Structure formats: C-alpha cells, structure tokens
C-alpha cells in the first residue's frame, strides 16, 4: 500500500475510552460505555455493556445479548461480513477474524486510505467460526497476546490426539477440561468430533447457554449432557468441560478422580500449567502465535503497524526491523479471556 499521511492519526486515535474514529464518531471495542461502539467479538474485554448503540456481526450481537441481557446495548445493529456501511465520513465493513464465532476485523476507509483493526484473530482452521480474511491496508492494528518468538502453537489436531490418548490410558478417571465459555469450549468440542469422538460430552452449567447458542447459530456440537444429571460412577472415562476455575471448586468433587486438563495458548508455559494444577496441558489457542502475527504483518503490506495489547514491544521491534513505522497503543482493559 502507499505511505500513510500523518492525518490518519488525527481521525483514528487512542482515548480514555479506547480506540476512537473521529471521522465516523464511533469507538472500536471501547473499554467503557459510549454513544456508538463497533464491537469486534463477544469476549468481555472487547464487548462491554451499556453502549447506546452497537454495531457488530449478527452472531456477536446474539452473543452479547446472551451474556449481558438487556445491558448489551440500547440499540444493536447487525452488519453482515463483507457488507459496506457509510458512517459519517468513513466507509466501514467487517471482515472475518477467525477468533470465535462472529469475530470480525473492522475495515475503515477514509481520505483514500484504509485502516484495519484486527481485534483478536487467529490464522488456524477452526470449525466453529469463519476463517480469517487477509485485508491489505495502509494501517494495520494488531493484537499481540502471544507476541513473542517463544510462542509457536502446535497443530490443534495433535493436541486433541493427546487428550484422547490420555482418556484411553486412564479409563477410571474423568478428564476435566478447563475451557472458556465462549469460543474455546465449542472449539474443543468441534475438534473432538472432527477426531472421531462421537461419545457424549459432559458440560458444566456455566457453558450450557453459549453452547446452545452456537447450535442455534448453525454450529453442530453433537450430544452435550449436563454433569448435574450424572452419577459419579457414570463419569468414569468421560470428558467433562468446565470453566478453568471449576477444578478447584466443590463442584469438582462429584467427578471420579478428575484429571485436570488445560486448553489454552498459555499451556505452553509450564509454570502457568503448574500454577493452575494442570496435569495435561493442551496448547490450544484462539489467538495468532508469533509466526502468524509476523506473517500477517508482512502480508497486509501496511506502511504502519499499531500494536494494541499483549507483548507489544517484541512485535513493534519486528515491524520496525522490517522497515515499517510501528508503535504500541497500550490500550487498557484487555484480558486473557479466550486465550
């Protein structure tokens, strides 16, 4: 793409509420309630309650409503992926981000230049959401959750094979897989189904609402049964999915010799796995790893790269080393949900 004039930073800037597009008078994933918000996906560190108006994909609107009820936003406007909308003086469309169901990149065009706000994204195949779409641009705003060279995620199918091998090895135990309620739980289920595991899977009540929503939105998950309906003996040799904190709750006492399983990009860090009491660490991330982040920066051909959250310094260093203008935005309020 062409070089970026200094004026881009005058209409796309960081404020106390987050990233603000002055030319369209809206915020992208604001950290507090605002009059108009464009939301990239439904995780709580990006989708906040209380906005007067929300623009997002139909799936993200449904997820926000399921998670927040009437607090999701006074007015919610769904926008289909690829559909262009004129807002103020800018043209806006949403492109797939490949992070979770409904996740999108925000593509803004103004004054002959294009900026892409990626939100959270990954480049790996995921049966539960639309694949990432590469959009060439002048300014690329990227996350950096796993923005260090040490983070290179293995193929998801191999991690699922490790889980199934452990289930076969310990038929007397219940495998308790700690997963985030949005995105990770459904992806683990879909990966198990793709690996040929057609037995019922058992879920904690905290996962039931979003799993049912995924089904309603067209993502088949197969038989999911509530743990509450099962006896302790019946769960031997079974796979149970629950929030990561459930392994340390009284709730887990109903399970037969639970074997704690972690499913996150952070499971590649042994200290984190030990800290969480994980016996089987599956490196299953819904974010881009170092190679995907750097590949994407190279392929979008942007003259400027802004890094929003995570391991910002290393990715900024990579971009500047490649001859690009790069800076860290240091946006507050981003967490690890869905890692």
Image (cartoon, helix red, strand yellow):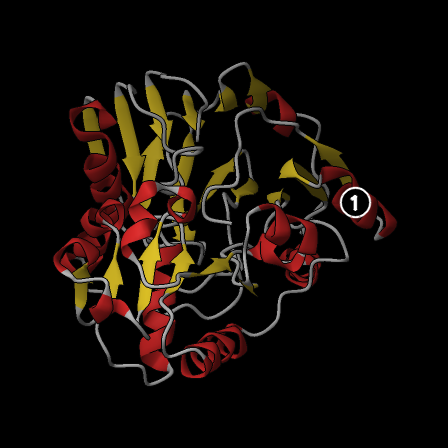
Taking depth in this image into account, of 176 and 282 the one nearest to the observer is: 176
Residue 15 rendering spot, x and y as whole percentages: 56, 16
Residue 4 coordinates in the image, percent (x, y): 69, 38
Is 163 placed left or right of 138 in the picture? left
Instruction: Reply above or below: 196 against 88.
Output: below
Locate residue 130: give its quadrant. bottom left
x and y percent of residue 237 in the render?
33, 75
- Comparing 60 with 267, the one in front is 267
Q: Is residue 128 visible?
A: no
Which quadrant would residue 90 be assigned to in this image? top left
Judge by depth and name the residue closer to the eye, 86 or 105.
105
Q: Which residue is mark 1?
A: 314
Of helix, strand and loop, which one carries label 1? helix
**Relative to 333, residue 309 above or below:** below
Is residue 15 visible in this depiction of the protein? Answer: yes
Badge count: 1
Q: Residue at x 58, y 23 (%)?
A: 13
For disc 1, the neighbor class at 10 Å (few under 14, some 14 to 19, many from 20) is some
Residue at image coords 23%, 62%: 232
Above/below status of 277 relative to 169: above
Q: Quadrant of residue 331?
A: top right
Q: Residue at x 37, y 79 (%)?
A: 171
């Amino acid at each position: 793409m062409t070089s970026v004039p200094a004026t881009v930073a005058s209409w796309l800037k960081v404020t106390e509420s987050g990233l603000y597009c002055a030319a369209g008078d809206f915020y992208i994933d604001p950290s507090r309630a605002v009059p108009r918000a464009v939301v990239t996906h439904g995780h709580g560190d990006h989708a906040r309650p209380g906005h007067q108006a929300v623009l997002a994909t139909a799936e993200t609107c449904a997820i926000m409503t399921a998670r927040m009820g009437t607090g999701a936003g006074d007015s919610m406007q769904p926008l289909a992926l690829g559909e262009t909308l004129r807002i103020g003086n800018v043209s806006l469309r949403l492109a797939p981000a490949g992070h979770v169901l409904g996740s999108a990149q925000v593509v803004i065009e103004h004054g002959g230049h294009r900026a892409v706000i990626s939100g959270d994204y990954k480049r790996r195949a995921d049966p539960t959401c639309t694949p990432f779409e590469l959009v060439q641009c002048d300014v690329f705003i990227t996350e950096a959750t796993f923005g260090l060279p040490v983070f290179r995620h293995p193929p998801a199918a191999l991690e699922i094979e490790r889980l199934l091998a452990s289930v076969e090895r310990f038929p007397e135990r219940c495998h308790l897989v700690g997963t985030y309620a949005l995105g990770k739980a459904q992806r683990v289920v879909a990966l198990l189904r793709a690996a040929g595991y057609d037995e019922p899977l058992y879920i904690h009540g905290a996962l039931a609402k979003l799993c049912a929503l995924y089904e309603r939105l067209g993502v088949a998950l197969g038989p999911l049964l509530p743990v509450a309906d099962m006896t302790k003996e019946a769960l031997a040799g079974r796979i149970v999915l629950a929030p990561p904190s459930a392994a340390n709750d009284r709730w887990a006492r109903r399970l037969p010799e639970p074997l704690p399983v972690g499913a996150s990009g952070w499971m590649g860090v042994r200290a984190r796995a030990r800290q969480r009491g994980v016996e089987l660490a599956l490196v299953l991330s819904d974010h881009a790893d170092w190679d995907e982040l750097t590949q994407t920066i190279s392929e979008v051909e942007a003259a400027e790269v802004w890094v929003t959250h995570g391991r910002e310094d290393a990715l900024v260093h990579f971009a500047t080393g490649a001859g690009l203008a790069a800076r860290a935005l240091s946006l507050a309020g981003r967490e690890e949900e869905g890692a």
